[in-house]
Each structure stands twice: as structure tokens, then as C-alpha cells.
Image: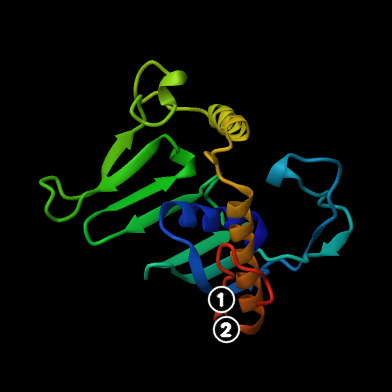
Amino acid sequence: MLGDLLSHGFDLAQYVVASVREVTALTETFIGSRPAPVGGGVGHQAHGDLDGDLLPVENEDYAAVLARLDGGAVATFESSRVAVGPRCGYGIEVFGSLGSARWDFERMNELEVCLGPGDAGYGFTRVLTDGAHGEFGRFNPGGGMGLSFEDLKVIEGAQFVTSVLTGEQLAPSVADGLQAARVAAAAEASAVDGLWHSVVPRGGVEGR
């Protein structure tokens, strides 16, 4: 859960808010054994033969992380591999004193925004993607149609190629991925001893 699913949340938080400074975490394995995998599978859709041999589960079914971020913000991260209901739910909620925003991957072409108590229509307002949002106009002529997962991969590929050709980092970098992995490693250590663990800062070196 930490290295697979929550690593994306750590990366998303550092992109939207700030880098994670320290964490405390807990993990749990609810299902102690599962059937051995049969054949191939796509992503998380692989499954085992229910009549096959049971093998011990070696990774967690659930993880929760409480974190302090640079600048004073605090964050909570939670993910479950066995929760019933979400098909591909992966969301972020950012709450501030002047406004808030929330987004979920299952409705990735929508953003909910609240501008705060001073707003005449106080409460969350649904914002649909259109030509004013990034590269949307290259794929759709009108707002509200939405981009697909494949469209986003094309945009990522274009950013990567442009970064290589120009030498300017446009897309997430290897350093971003490393930082998310550092948060996951600190959370894994915390899940073992129950203590707060500092995250090696960007540009820092492990073991120092």
C-alpha cells in the first residue's frame, strides 16, 4: 500500500501543497492468506484460483499516514486494497482559511472549489475542464467533454520529450519520484516502531 498506492498520494501532495517533512504511520493486513496467482493480469486485476493453494500475504491491505509538511500544513493519507465500493477512487482534498478544493480520479475532469465564507454562493462549486485548462483544447473543441486517461498519457509523453529536447524540466522529474519513495520509506519505518520519522529532504542524502 505504501510503495504502490500511497506513493502517488505523497507525490500529489508535494506537487499541490508542499514537501512532506515527517510522518507517522500504521499498516494492517486483514487477510492473512490468499490463493496463488493464476496466469497473467493487468495491474490490480490479477487474481488467484479460489480452489488453489493458499499463500501467506506479505504486504499490507491498509495504510494510514499522518504527516507534517513544509510550511506548517498537516496532511492525512489513507488507502485500502480491500475496501468495498471505490472502483478507482483516488482523491485529494485541500482545506485552507480562504478556500478549499477537492478532486477524485473517478471524476478526473471535475474539480470542486469553495472560495470561502465571503463568497456569495458559499459552498463547493463544480468546475468542468475546458480550453482554459492546460492542453484540453488540443483534444476537445468544447468544455465539459473531458479528457481520457490516454489523452493525459499523450500530454505526459509530450512534456517528457520537450523536457529532453529543451533541457527545461516540464514534467515530474526523477527527483520527484525519489522524494515520494523517501516518504514511503519513512512511513514504512514508522509502521514498524510507531514513532515519528523524518523524511530526507529534497537534495539530501540518506544516512545523514
For residue 198, the mark is 1
CA gap between label 1 and label 2 equals 10 Å
Q: Position of residue 179 (x, y in %)?
A: 59, 60
Residue 112 is situated, as x and y percent measured from the top left of the image, at 32, 44
> Residue sitting at 51 percent across and 49 percent down?
90
Mark 2 sits on what residue?
Answer: 195
Q: Nearer the viewer, residue 3 or 126?
A: 3
Residue drawn at x 57%, y 30% as measured from the top left = 162
Q: Between residue 82 and residue 99, name the one nearer to us.
A: 99
Determine crowd level at label 2: few under 14, some 14-19, many 20+ residues with C-alpha closer than 10 A: some
Q: Nearer the viewer, mark 1 or mark 2?
A: 1
Is residue 38 left or right of 88 when viewed as pictured? right
Q: Residue at x 61, y 53 (%)?
A: 175
Is there a contact, CB below 8 Å, between mark 1 and mark 2?
no
Check the image and report above or below for 30 versus 180. below
Label 1 neighbourhood size at 10 Å, few (<14), some (14-19), many (20+)?
Answer: some
Q: Which mark is residue 187?
A: none
Label 2 is placed on what type of residue?
Leu
Q: Is residue 56 above or below residue 49?
A: below
Q: Position of residue 153 (x, y in %)?
A: 58, 31
Q: Is residue 132 left or right of residue 168?
A: left
Q: Height in image: 109 above or below 103? A: above
Residue 1 visible in the picture? no
Q: Is residue 205 left or right of residue 201?
A: right
Q: Quarter holding the C terminus? A: bottom right
- Residue type beneath disc 1: Ser
